[in-house]
Image (cartoon, rainbow, N blue to C red):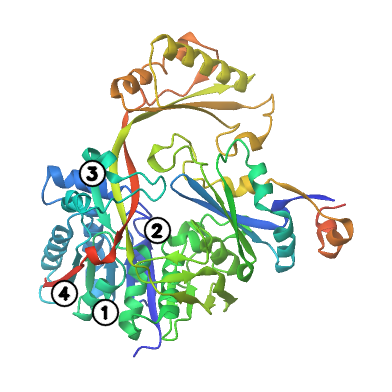
Amino acid sequence: MKQKVRIAAGQGFWGDLPDAPVRQVEGGPIDYLMLDYLAEVTMSIMQKQKARDPNAGYARDFVSLMNEILPACVDRGIKVVANAGGVNVEGCANAIVDVARKLDYSGKVKIGIVTGDDLLERIDDFITRGIELRNMDTDEVLASVRDRIQSANAYLGAAPIVEALGKGAQIVITGRATDTGLTLGPMIHEFGWAENDWNKLAAGTIAGHIIECGAQCSGGNCQYEWETIPDLVSVGFPIAEASPDASFVITKHNGTGGRINVPSIKEQLVYEMGDPHEYITPDCVADFTTIQLAEDGPDRVRVFGIKGRPSTEFLKVSISYSAGYKAVGTLVYAWPDAYEKARTADKILRGRLERLGLSFDQILTEFVGVNATHGPLAGKPSPDLAEVQLRVGVRGNDRSAVERFTKEIAPLILTGPPSVTGFAGGRPKVKEIVAYWPALIPKSEITPQVETIEA
Amino acid sequence: MRIRLREIAHARSGDKGDTANVGVIALRDEFYPLLVRELTAARVKNHFKGICKGEVERFDLPNLGALNFLLHESLGGGGTLSLMTDAQGKTLSTALLRMEIEVPDPEAKQLGLAKANGS
């Protein structure tokens, strides 16, 4: 058994620094490259792409990335675990097979395919059988938005990834899998942890939580002494160095920028935290109040002492549904009296919307430079502000009303308060809102499937 | 003496639907008891009046010198439904650090705060 396994994070979200995974592969030794491509509403975008083209519906970025790094990964024995498959895991795997053949790596790459998360075709069956898939936030039953559902996927955990690695897969592609499972899976595979060794599973899960947002644990978005964090131009993405006893070190490649220390890890640990006693994943329930941290040399933090408990009988399901339309318009007002001018413009705009008889579920006005981030806590603005951006958003089910709103912004320049600019981009775009519906489903309903193909 | 929370803590915030979380971390271990004492859920709820329309829950993480607050109904519907610039509550971390707290002078002196504050 290896005594140390290095799992490198290459993407903190879909759209993160494109060269970060390349730098993880090229910048020093790693054993695994972990890539998270799926945000909450990503699946609905991919579902739409697949409806237009049956060969689409996965993260194409992953294919171009593999085109760049596949030879290095194969030659050095680096395994890749990615939830890049979206709603077409087979299509994604086939694209990687094509890449391998093109690069003359035929017969040298085994690809693991994890499916079974896509529930879109099973929704009616669930509802008929009394599985209501109630919204975890609002408690509404899913039937209330049945005709507007665009995608539905269960979050799979580490187990099918472990199975794929066990079958010799060098590249494991999943659909909706938890970010934490992408990191925990390789640890279970390498160290042979038992499926009920809750403390170890919790430790691997927390390692996953720390590195899943990429550089957000290694100096990015870090408040602690932020002015002194070196060389964010070349910020190093995190690497979890795991040991068989489930302690691990968070570090980054030598010569990269950013900073890893106890405060930077603490900031990431509390990110998107709920009840710290129960961080629930398909694999275990991790207790964040047991985490111990210690500095372990420059840009190294050791994490140990973690306790976990048995996983629950449910999996989380991520459902996306169409929820109306929105548009946001902005204009910039300059000194003097920038804030007063922006406020007056807002009143005029609202008066015109009212005169047109347009109604919306919500209208929100923000004054960027005054209250857009901290609201009333920002206090009274200085009368001498150099400029203020008026930002007005509307939301509603009537697309034509939202469309009409977008035509009322530009006219304010010639029909409202003076010293105004900032309309070079044209009319605001109307966006369809795809909203997120979190629900729970009994684990017994979901059977992950794992297969491997040779390139 | 009155100090701003940012003198003794750093923070990070994020979202889960229409709920924002703000994790507040003591800059030095010896500041943590001050956070535990002063940052009650009620106090934080009052601080965020006009922003947080729901309940505030507090969870303690003494192992990290941190407190985690859940601010329910704070993100204009949350996710893609929200019209807010900060629909994910990412800047509520520093919004909390604006809070002013009263520290008895002897305690402030013991914690080295008086000096840091130049008074």
Chain letter for mark 3, please.
Answer: A
Asked if the residue at tag 2 contacts the one at tag 3, i.e. Cβ–Cβ closer than 8 Å, the answer is no
Asked if the residue at tag 3 contacts the one at tag 1, i.e. Cβ–Cβ closer than 8 Å, the answer is no
Q: Amino acid at mark 4?
A: Lys
Spatial distance from mark 2 to mark 4, Cα to Cα? 25 Å
Instruction: Name the residue carrying label 2.
Output: A12
Q: Of marks 3 and 2, which one's residue comes earlier in the chain?
A: 2
**Residue at x-position 53% and y-position 77%:** A302
Chain letter for mark 1, please.
Answer: A
Q: Nearer the viewer, mark 3 or mark 4?
A: 3
Q: How many marks?
A: 4
Q: Amino acid at mark 2?
A: Gly
Asked if the residue at tag 2 contacts the one at tag 1, i.e. Cβ–Cβ closer than 8 Å, the answer is no
Instruction: Name the residue carrying label 3.
Output: A150
Q: Nearer the viewer, mark 1 or mark 3?
A: 3
**Label 3 crowd bin: few (<14), some (14–19), many (20+), radius 10 Å:** many
Res. A89 image quadrant: bottom left
Spatial distance from mark 1 to mark 3, Cα to Cα? 38 Å
Instruction: Name the residue carrying label 4.
Output: A110
**Label 4 crowd bin: few (<14), some (14–19), many (20+), radius 10 Å:** many
Name the foreground residue: A30 vs B15.
B15
Callout 4: SS: strand
Instruction: Name the residue carrying label 1.
Output: A77
Q: Of marks 2 and 4, which one's residue comes earlier in the chain?
A: 2
Res. A431 image quadrant: top left
Across and down, in percent, residue A19 comes to 35, 59
Pointers 1 and 2 within a single chain: yes
Name the foreground residue: A96 vs B66.
B66
Chain letter for mark 4, please.
Answer: A
Callout 1: SS: loop
